[in-house]
Every structure is written in structure tokens, then in C-alpha cells.
Image (spheres, grey):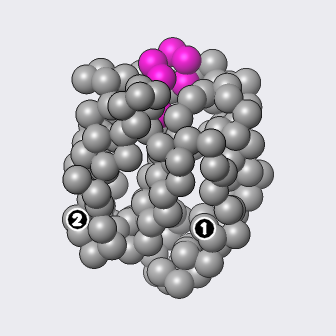
Amino acid sequence: MTIEIGNQAPDFTLKSQHGEEVTLSELRGKPVALVFFPFAFSGICTGELCEIRDNIAAFAASADHGEVQVLAISCDHFFSNRAFADAEGLTFPVLSDFWPHGEVSRAYGIFNEGAGAPERGTYLLDAEGIVRWKVEHPIGEARDFEAYRAAIAELF
């Protein structure tokens, strides 16, 4: 199943790098960017998430809507995500789709069975949890950060 623009984003509860449960539906009332990435510590993933870290101000929305909450999601165990987030200075939640393995990635239609990891999918949700923008790339193809800026500007 592929998630389409205009669809309600599938709800989930995943563990953050700090072992805390994060439930998507509990973030209603603020926009959310879901950033699925294949592997902690890999070159492209590190580059993409550090670019988000270095440009987090791009996720500051209008005063009426508040800041866009970034949630990075991989199938790595939350302990690995903790080491990765600490090593790279990531302050946004890095969530673990470890068990049941890839269940959330599958719900969004981007789980790569051969790799055992999600493809690179980003979904921008409005405050009601509706998908307003998405970009999907294969594991080996980085996303263009400027596309985030344009999508956020268009949403607000």
C-alpha cells in the first residue's frame, strides 16, 4: 500500500532514541515531517539527517501553525538510534521501527524487503495528520533538502 497525498497518515507508536514512546496521533494540532531512512551511520543517511539538523530552522512554520515536528524513522534498534543521534547531535526524535520489524515502514508502503529497511520516504503532514506532500527515493538516492523548504513554504 502506498500513501497518497490527501490520505490520513497511518498512526503508529514507536520508541525514540531515548526509549520513550512517540505516538503520531498525539502530535495532532501541529504539522509533522516523517523522514524514513534506511540505516543509522550510513553515508547518505548521515548526510541527510545532519542537513536537517543544520537547517532545522527551515521546519519553523508560521506563527499560526507552529514548528513542524521532525520524526526520523529507521528499522534500527533504538539503542543504535541513540548512539547515532548522540554521535551526530540530532535533537529531534529518531524512532525505531525495529519490532515488529518494519511494520510502520510497510504501512507507508516503503519497506524494502530485500534490504530489510525502509526506502527514503518523507511525508509532510498537516496539523490534522493528512499527508500534504511526499517524496520517495530508493535506498541509494539522497533526497534534495531544498524540496523540504518548498513544501513547508507551500503548506503554510
Which residue is more in the foreground, 31 or 150?
150
56 in relation to 50, above or below: below
Q: Is residue 154 magenta?
A: no
Residue 3 horizontal/vertical position (percent) = 29, 60
Q: Which amino acid, mark 2?
A: Gln
Which residue is more in the foreground, 127 or 119?
119
Which residue is more in the foreground, 65 or 94?
94
* Relative side of 94 to 30, left or right: right
Query: Do tag 1 and tag 2 residues touch (Cβ < 8 Å)?
Result: no
Seen at 22% across and 65% down, the residue is 8
* Relative side of 65 to 140, left or right: left
- Tell which circle, 1 or 2, labels the residue nearer the N-terminal end: 2
Q: Residue furthest front?
A: 114
Which residue is more in the foreground, 109 or 150?
109
* Relative side of 26 to 53, left or right: left
Residue for badge 1? 148
- Give, as a single range, the part of the protein colored magenta: 74-81
Residue 75 horizontal/vertical position (percent) = 43, 28
Seen at 40% across and 36% down, the residue is 112
Q: Secondary structure at mark 2?
A: loop
Residue for badge 2? 8
Seen at 25% across and 45% down, the residue is 107
Residue 35 horizontal/vertical position (percent) = 50, 49
Q: Is residue 77 magenta?
A: yes
The answer to whether one can see residue 95 in this image is no
Seen at 28% across and 57% down, the residue is 2
Q: CA distance from mark 1 to mark 2?
A: 20 Å
The answer to whether one can see residue 84 in this image is yes
Query: Is the residue marked by circle 2 packed among few (<14), some (14-19), or many (20+) residues within 10 Å?
Result: some
97 in relation to 51, above or below: above
Residue 155 horizontal/vertical position (percent) = 48, 80
Q: Which amino acid, mark 1?
A: Tyr
